[in-house]
Image (spheres, rainbow, N blue to C red):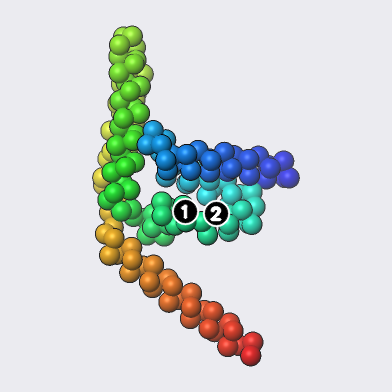
Amino acid sequence: MKLKRIIFASLGLICFALGTVGVFLPILPTTPFYLATLFFFANSSERLHTWFLGTKLYKKHLESFVKKRGMLLSTKLSIIITVTLLMGFGFFMMARKGIWIPCIILAVVWICHILYFVFRVKTISKEEQAETERREMEESDSKEDTISGGKE
């Protein structure tokens, strides 16, 4: 059991590092790596999971998706553009060599990816996100008031 937790923590750290590099390099997609980080940390260590949920990187790139199953249009576009460029490069390189079956598979995966982000992931506005954050802040403050009020 301990070995499993170590493996999950290690994979989480690797995904976190790759996702963080993806923030600065448009070639690496940030969101999928952070989703993997969230999964691995949740299955390895409560402390790592809680820490990751508190980072600005999580809040900026994933929180709205995880809580509302939605993303800002700018986030969706950055993911779609990055994946399109990467898959397009792979497609181009394989097509040059005449390797058509992997090209077809890659094209199907790309189409499914686009359809998923366009039709399944809700697009939220910045106002919706700000309203949700404000509401969560108020709920958090009221919980803290209740807790501190009960101890006095």
Q: Residue at x 35, y 28 (%)?
A: 86
Task: State the residue at coordinates (59%, 42%).
Answer: 13
Label 2 element class: helix
Question: Outermost residue, top direction?
Answer: 97
| Residue 63 position by quadrant | bottom left
Residue 116 visible in this rendered orientation of the protein: no
Residue 52 image label: 2
In percent of width and height, residue 21 lies at: 47, 39
Residue 80, numbered label: none
Q: Mark 1 or mark 2: which comes first in sequence?
A: 2
Discs 1, 2 touching: Cβ within 8 Å:
yes
> Residue 69, percent across and down?
37, 55
Q: Position of residue 149 (x, y in %)?
A: 58, 88
Mark 2 is on which residue type?
Phe
Vertical placement of residue 43 versus 95, above or below:
below
Mark 1 residue crowding within 10 angstroms, few (<14) / some (14–19) / many (20+) = many
Residue at coordinates 34% horizontally, 12% vertically from top-left? Answer: 99
| In-image side of 101 versus 35 (left or right) | left
**Which residue is under mark 1?**
58
Label 1 sits on a secondary structure element that is helix
